[in-house]
Every structure is written in C-alpha cells, then in structure tokens.
Image: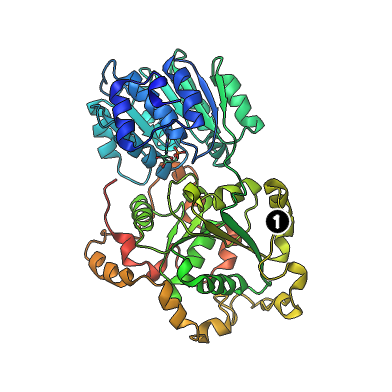
Amino acid sequence: MTFSDLGLSPKVLSAVTDAGYTEPTPIQAGAIPHALAGKDVLGIAQTGTGKTASFVLPMLTRLERGRARARMPRTLILEPTRELAAQVEENFVKYGKNHRLNIALLIGGVSFDEQEKKLERGADVLIATPGRMLDHFERGKLLLTGVEILVIDEADRMLDMGFIPDIERICKLIPFTRQTLFFSATMPPEITKLTQQFLQAPVRVEVSRPATTATNITQRFVKVGSKPWAKRDKLRKLIDDEGETLKNAIIFCNRKTEVATLFRSLVRHEYDAGALHGDMDQRARMAMLENFRKGNLKLLVASDVAARGLDIPDVSHIFNFDVPIHADDYVHRIGRTGRAGRSGKAFTLVSRADQKYVDTIGKLIGLDTEWLDGDLSTLSAEDDADERPRGRNARRGGHKDDTAPQEKADDARKPRREAIKSDNAERRTRKDADEAPAHPRQPAKDPQRSRAPERAARPERSDRHEQREDAPLGFGDDMPAFMKVSVKS
Ligand code: AMP
C-alpha cells in the first residue's frame, strides 16, 4: 500500500513525499481512510508507530475546506505534556508546509498573552494541554463550539496524570456533531469507559506493540547494595565502563526530586549531564531537549512523565536509575534506544526492595532477566549494610548529603570521565552565559500545576527527607549555563 491509496489530498501527499516516507505504517493505513471519511477512530497504538501522522495527515486534508474564525478553533488536539504538544505542532508544520494554516499551541509555562493573540487571529488547529486550554476557556478567550475534529492523544498517560476529569469536561464543551480521534497505548477500564461515553460507533484500529524485547537492545539488570550512595556510585561506574560506546544516554528516575538530586551529583562529578522533569520551566525543558537531540549533551536525567513519547531518534544507552513501578514504563523507557534498527543498551539498577518490580517486568517482556554481574543473592554483607545514621539527630548529623566518603575523595576515575565529558560543554557554557534568561530559576507558572500549588512548589514530605537540609530546590547553584539558552517556543 502507498500513501496515495489512502485518499489524502495532493498537497498532503506532496509533503509526505518530501518527508521521505514511502509507505504508511500500520496505524496510518488503518486509521487514515476512516478519519478522512469523518468516522470516529479509536487507535490503540503507542509512540514510535507513526500515530501522530495518522491523525495529522487526514486533519490537514479535511482542513483544506473552510477557514478559521477568531477565538473559534476548528480542530483541537489534547496532549498530556507540553513536549508532546510541541512535537505535534512540529508535525503540523512539517506535513502542513503546503497549507496556510494558523496553529495555536496552548501549553503551560509560557505567557498567556501570545497565546491569546493567536486565538484572536483565528486558529485552524489548537494543540493544547488540558489545564492550559481550560484556563483560556475560563478567561473567555476561547469558544469551543466551532470544533469539528477533536483528537485525544496518549489517553492512558492522561489517566496517569489525573487529567481525565478535565478531558470529560472538555468533551462536553464541544458539539456532539464533532469527529473524535482517540489514541491510547493501553486500554485500562477508565479509558474504555471514556471511549464509550464520548466516541460514536468508533472504528477500532489496533497495532501491535513494537517488540518489547527487540533483539537489538541488550538489557542487563545490575544489583546494588542498600547504602544511600550505592546507586549513584554504580551508575557512574557503568557509564565509565561503557566508555566510547556510550554516545548519549537517558537516565530515568521515578521521581522528580530524584532527578534533581542525581543531576546535581553527576554535574558535581563533572559529567556532561542535563535534566528533564515536570517542575522545570518550559524554556529550560525545551532548551534541554534541543541540546540532547542535537548531541550537545551526553546524559539526560529524566522522569517518565517528562520523557514519555518524545521522539529522540538516536539514543545509545538507557539507564534505569530506579526500577519503574509500572512494568509498562520499563518498555517505554528502553524503547528510547535501539530505534530504527540501531543497537542499544539498557541497564537497570536493582536493590533488594525492587525484586518484585523486576519479576513483573520479566513476566511482561517474557524473558529471563539477565544480570550483569550476578543477581541480588550475590550481594555481599557489606553491600547490604545500610550505613545511614539512625536516631534523633541522624538527619542533622554527619550524613547530610548521602555522599559516599569515597565519592568525595575519589579522583581516580577522573581521566576516564573526561572521555564522557563533551568537549563542547565548556564552549557552550561560555557562549550561553550571555543569553541566560533574567530569572532562570523562577518556578514555572503552569496553571496545570497551579491546581495543586503545594505539590508543585515543594517536594513531598518523603522527598524532602532524602535531600540535604540546605539543598536548594531545582538545581540550585549547579544549574549549567546551557540550560538558560533561549529557544523559540
Ligand atoms: P510517532 O509514532 O508519531 O511519534 O512517529 C515516530 C517516528 O516515525 C517519527 O519520527 C516520524 O517522523 C516517523 N514516521 C511517521 N510515519 C512514517 C512513515 N510512514 N514512514 C517512516 N517513518 C515515519
């Protein structure tokens, strides 16, 4: 099958050809003809399957008729994260190069004013995160009665992030006569209920998961002891041991506070590292991603939410600093490497407390878990000793930053680290220092999070216990200058 068999317009076909695509992916072949026919579509597919084009291409074809009116967008695409929303916008720009469409991106972390101006001018396509979209609606800047096509993307991730009530509300604000294109990687009961409520006789298009255990990804589990610094020690050793074969890596943590702590630790040890988590302002997140995509940054420490669905084509290594609690997240994480047939490596650090999660992952991927250097039963008594001071003054006492004594003194590995440090890092730091925004460390003003200001502004109780008492939130004084580079968003 070719793209021209699908019923797309000549303008769209020409842009697809220019993008270099010759054959539609299964989700595209399955969804596009129905979407063009105006039917509701339930697409069960995850990122990496070409699902973005499966809704962008028919939307572009259908938008060729009619034009935008002020404050009344014709189509609405809801995305769970700002990065995914920005990625969909890029797709509209790429495939819509032969169209003159007005696109408005409504995401948190950036000013309302510019977004309002775009809405005033009339948007054909509105790409939004649910919280920011509702904020505009509540300010009276947006009318949803003109929406002809609604796309709900990554619905299961919306569920994880607590957006389902917002989605239900938005669905009720849009005319019943609309067309709905709904995408989710999995179908938990809450999502099934949502589709029953808001889709009309949908055509179901399901594509199989990309192989979870692609043979081109080497997966290894790595035992770690229970000392507070054991994981950071082990991670550095793994990175050093990979040497030149490590082109770049994403290091996943389960919580955003852990992202910040690990990032600070890596920078302190002179690794070329950056971080991506939900509490960073949008400008910093975009700059960080851009640097990583361009190869200016070797190690990206990230949370699942921030990294989910991102299309970063060439990642050589994945490190799971924390074992993911949901086995599905393991598949998503390691799927960041080994893309397009390249080979990749994934290492997962495992302590005794993680055993049950590893077992679930093993069942999901249907493979025996392979250990790098012996499984947990081979941990020595010394590895197992938890040296955290106990008692009333423990947290104020000598163990303030969980830093291993040897970590502080250890300079022996420095020469090897130099190989990991990008030559560009220093040059970049000097160049970018001049371009730093005025208040790079201001907390993001994201209405999505302003709904839970306490949570957004401060780490949760248990998180705070893990941090130094004097530790600044965010990245403190360790924020590298390249994070402050200004980007167009
Ligand atoms: P997505 O699942 O939408 O995130 O797309 C994953 C990647 O596949 C993106 O880099 C797209 O540019 C690429 N892609 C989408 N459709 C095709 C196609 N028909 N042939 C080759 N690559 C594609």
Residue shown at the point (26%, 61%) measured from the top left: 436
Which quadrant would the C terminus be assigned to in this image? top left
Kindly identify which residue carries mark 1: 358
Which amino acid type corresponds to the residue marked 1 in the rendered image? Val
Q: Position of residue 218 (x, y in %)?
A: 59, 58
Q: Position of residue 406 (x, y in %)?
A: 57, 84
Q: Nearer the viewer, residue 332 or 245?
A: 245
Colour logic? rainbow
Residue shown at the point (37%, 22%) measured from the top left: 4
Q: Nearer the viewer, residue 449 or 419?
A: 419
Vertical comparison of 338 with 297: above or below: above
Please state if 329 lies on the left or on the right of 115 as rendered: right
Quick one: which residue is furthest to the top in this view? 177
Q: Position of residue 79 (x, y in %)?
A: 45, 36
Q: Residues within 10 Å of mark 1 (few under 14, many from 20)?
A: many
Vertical comparison of 207 with 234: above or below: above
Residue shown at the point (35%, 30%) measured from the top left: 126
Residue shown at the point (44%, 16%) measured from the top left: 178
Q: How many marks?
A: 1
Q: Position of residue 372 (x, y in %)?
A: 66, 67
Residue 139 can be seen, yes or no? no
Q: Nearer the viewer, residue 453 or 488?
A: 488
Residue 232 can be seen, yes or no? yes
Ligand 1 is found in the corner quadrant, namely top left
Please state if 288 lies on the left or on the right of 301 as rendered: left
In the picture, residue 200 is in which quadrant?
top right
